[in-house]
Image (tube, helix red, strand yellow):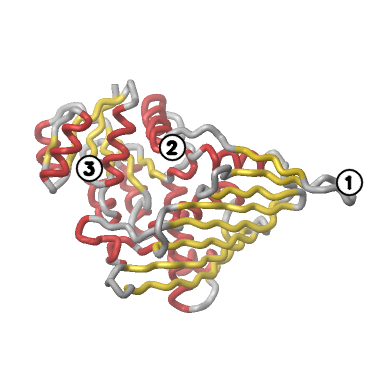
């Protein structure tokens, strides 16, 4: 039995708690949140004990195996290191840290203390995205050439509006588009160059609006155009991958969200549209189930802490491009970081 102490009783903390509750080999040792009512409510919901500080929980609990961090981004590094000091494995929601420098510190610190560090890039566990990746790898659309992704919805409301503080959240590019940075890198390899534009402002009702467009050029030759928005009602995501022999199109807002259109090799033949809609499963449950299995048997996870670091590096390049109005190469970024 793996005992998990969950930090944070907000939206993601609730999602993680419900997922753990459905796993036979996991026990939620406690819920920690400085907001007493949130800790009490979630603890009661999943049948465990509430705590109002990390230190209080560690003083009272025995045999905790994992610290699951569902706190605001700017607190990830602090609590991951506290967990490592106590020789506890760490599952951390994405982004791994507020910056690539902090992420590297976390990775090195956990390695030094011989604890496992996992990062929650949950898109890797969505059946639809897994199906898309498998279709690409099977060569069903030929050689991939151009990709377009969309992701977003309304501006997220959270404790003390920390998403609205760029220094704490990193804004839309780091918090939201990070999903697509990681997923596309898993499909097409390393990114070579990044160009990005964004808009961030308040609307007439003083609500935050964020919108960004990011272009990635991969070393493999694939060109990707990413759209991220915190300016629309209702969340949705989508991806279109065009190759030399066909197109994959997915849009979560459609009734039949995933389809594969192949081009027949005979000249003049019409395209064949094959609707596909994988059975739904809870990707957060699959993600946490996978991480727990890795802790139990020592295996390597599908998505590593190093993957989390690389995704943050791409976000860093995109933000730098927004600030300068110029494209940024990953080589240049790495050279600056090495100085």
**Residue under the point 44% across and 57% down:** 152
CB atoms at circles 2 and 3 under 8 Å apart?
no
In depth, the one of 326 and 246 nearer the eye is 246
Marks 2 and 3, Cα distance to the nearest angstrom?
20 Å
Vertical position of residue 256 compared to residue 99: above or below: above
**Residue under the point 47% across and 54% down:** 310
Q: Nearer the viewer, mark 2 or mark 1?
A: 1
**In what element is the residue under mark 3?**
strand
**In what element is the residue under mark 1?**
loop
The disc label shown at residue 212, or none = none
Q: Nearer the viewer, mark 2 or mark 3?
A: 2
* Residue where numbered disc 1 is placed: 266
* Residue where numbered disc 2 is placed: 283
The percent coordinates of residue 318 (x first, y second) are: 47, 67
Quarter of the rendering containing residue 85: top left
Q: Is residue 185 among what the camera can see?
A: no
Which residue is the extreme one toward the front? 255
Report the side of 289 relative to 270 (left or right). left
The disc label shown at residue 7, or none = 3
């Amino acid at each position: 039995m793996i005992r998990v102490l969950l930090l944070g009783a907000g939206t993601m903390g609730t999602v993680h708690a419900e997922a753990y509750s459905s796993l036979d080999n996991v026990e939620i040792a406690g819920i920690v949140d400085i907001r007493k009512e949130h800790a009490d409510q979630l603890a009661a919901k999943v049948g465990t004990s509430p705590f109002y500080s990390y230190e209080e929980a560690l003083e009272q609990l025995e045999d905790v195996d994992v610290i699951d961090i569902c706190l605001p981004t700017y607190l990830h590094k602090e609590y991951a290191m506290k967990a490592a000091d106590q020789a506890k494995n760490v599952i951390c929601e994405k982004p791994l840290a507020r910056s690539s420098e902090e992420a590297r510190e976390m990775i090195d610190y956990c390695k030094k203390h011989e604890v496992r560090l996992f990062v929650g890039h949950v898109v890797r566990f969505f059946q639809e995205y897994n199906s898309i990746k498998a279709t690409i790898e099977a060569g069903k659309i030929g050689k991939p050439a151009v990709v377009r992704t969309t992701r977003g919805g309304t501006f997220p409301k959270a404790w003390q509006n920390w998403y609205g503080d760029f220094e704490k959240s990193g804004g839309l590019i780091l918090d939201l588009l990070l999903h697509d940075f990681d997923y596309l890198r898993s499909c097409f390899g390393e990114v070579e160059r990044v160009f990005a534009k964004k808009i961030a402002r308040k609307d007439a009702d003083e609500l935050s609006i964020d919108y960004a467009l990011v272009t990635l050029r991969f070393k493999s030759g694939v060109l990707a155009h990413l759209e991220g928005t915190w300016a629309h009602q209702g969340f949705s995501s989508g991806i279109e991958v065009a190759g030399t022999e066909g197109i994959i199109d997915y849009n979560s807002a459609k009734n039949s969200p995933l389809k594969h259109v192949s081009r027949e090799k005979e000249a003049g033949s019409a395209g064949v549209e094959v609707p596909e809609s994988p059975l739904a499963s809870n990707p957060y449950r699959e993600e946490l189930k996978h991480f727990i299995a890795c802790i139990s048997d020592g295996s390597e996870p599908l998505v590593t802490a190093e993957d989390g670091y690389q995704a943050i590096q791409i976000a860093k390049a995109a933000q730098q491009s927004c600030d300068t109005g110029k494209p940024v190469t990953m080589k240049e970024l790495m050279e600056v970081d090495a100085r």
